[in-house]
Image (cartoon, rainbow, N blue to C red):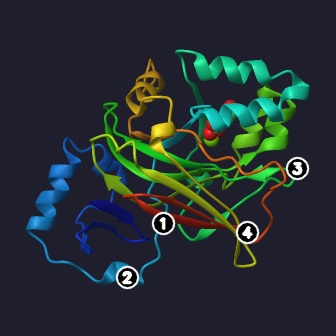
């Protein structure tokens, strides 16, 4: 089942029908003792609603922090080593790929997050910007993975490649993150066959398209969560992007009006346009 957020309500989708929830606080739902059972109970005793069809979806986030993992796919390791070779940073990326401790970094809070069908941004002081399509974990305050969504970790590769210490500037700025379209509520791991697809459209033509699967993800999501929650509390739960396995060629940099479509099997497609 998938949870959607609009300007004035929350909905759960089950077997292609939408049910409006009584609750209006996503924070409260994320903190629920057993969200899946709670939503199943709601569906069993309510009638489907058609409201959602006409309503614009919002990013499925309230007071959650958004964190991200890095260099969790071999393709990401390879690309970062290449982009930072003049800065001597290549060694760091190889070391973090093989280390026991993962790379985790702060990415966003709600006001920096773009929802479905809205605008993401590229920095005006960046010359090489890319989307990063990432399976994103929804984690409750008790460090349990309770769902999944599609995430876009927009990145300025020239800034990141100049010096690894510039990572926060390359990664964190207004609308540098997109989440949605909804939250797949599921505590079981996603199958390793799950496909992640990125399409970039320029003037309505596909200019780049690639896929990967979760079989390429080197880290176990549970271990990423365990590291994130070490001596670190999230009273409203949090999101954790699990890293990118798709890196567009070095010649590609995003431009204004490009459309970014990220599809993760079982969750949906997150579409955003570059401002
Ligand atoms: O180490 C830099 C960031 C890596 C990242 O965002 C990724 O691998 O997805
Ligand atoms: Mg990333």
Query: Which residue is found at the position 34% from the left and 35% from the top?
Result: 141
Q: Which of marks 2 and 4 is nearer the N terminus?
A: 2
- The residue that mark 1 highlights is 58
Question: Mark 1 near ligand 2 (CB under 8 Å)?
Answer: no
Q: Residue at x 88, y 51 (%)?
A: 127
- Crowding around mark 4 (Cα neighbors within 10 Å: few <14, some 14 to 19, many 20+) is many
Q: Vertically, is 120 above or below 98?
A: below
Please identify, in this view, whether the residue under mark 2 or under mark 4 is nearer the observer. 4
Residue nearest the observer in this picture, 156 or 52: 156
x, y (%) of residue 21? 24, 66
Label 2 to label 4, Cα distance in Å? 26 Å
Q: Residue 125 carries which label?
A: 3
Distance from the alpha carbon under mark 1 to that under mark 3:
28 Å
Is the residue indicated by label 3 positioned so its CB lies within 8 Å of ligand 1?
Answer: no
- In the displayed structure image, the side of residue 222 where residue 45 appears, left or right: left
Neighbourhood count class around disc 3 (C-alpha, 10 Å): few under 14, some 14–19, many 20 upward: few
From the image, tell me which residue sits under label 2: 53
- Residue 64 visible in the displayed image: no
- The x and y percentages for residue 76 are 66, 36
């Amino acid at each position: 089942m998938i949870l959607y957020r609009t300007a004035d309500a929350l909905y759960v989708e089950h077997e292609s029908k939408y049910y409006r929830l009584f609750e209006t606080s996503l924070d409260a739902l994320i903190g629920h003792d057993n969200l899946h059972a709670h939503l199943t109970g709601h569906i069993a005793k309510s009638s489907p609603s058609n409201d959602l069809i006409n309503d614009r979806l919002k990013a499925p986030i309230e007071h959650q922090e958004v964190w991200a993992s890095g260099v969790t796919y071999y393709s990401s390791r390879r690309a970062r080593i290449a982009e930072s070779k003049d800065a001597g940073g290549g060694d760091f990326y190889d070391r973090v790929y093989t280390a026991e401790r993962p790379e985790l970094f702060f990415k966003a809070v709600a006001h920096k997050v773009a929802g479905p069908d809205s605008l993401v941004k590229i920095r005006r002081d960046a010359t090489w910007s890319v989307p990063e399509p990432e399976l994103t974990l929804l984690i409750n305050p008790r460090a349990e993975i309770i769902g999944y969504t599609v995430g876009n970790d927009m990145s300025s590769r020239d800034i990141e490649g100049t010096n690894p210490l510039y990572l926060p500037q390359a990664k964190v700025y207004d609308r540098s993150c997109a989440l949605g379209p909804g939250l797949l509520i599921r505590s079981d791991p996603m199958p390793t066959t799950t496909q992640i697809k990125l399409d970039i459209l320029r003037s309505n033509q596909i200019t780049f398209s690639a896929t990967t699967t979760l079989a390429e993800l080197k880290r176990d999501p549970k271990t990423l969560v365990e590291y994130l929650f070490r001596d670190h509390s999230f009273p409203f739960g949090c999101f954790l992007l699990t890293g990118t396995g798709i890196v567009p060629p070095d010649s590609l940099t995003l431009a204004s009006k490009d459309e970014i479509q990220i599809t993760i099997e079982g969750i949906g497609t997150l579409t955003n346009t570059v401002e």
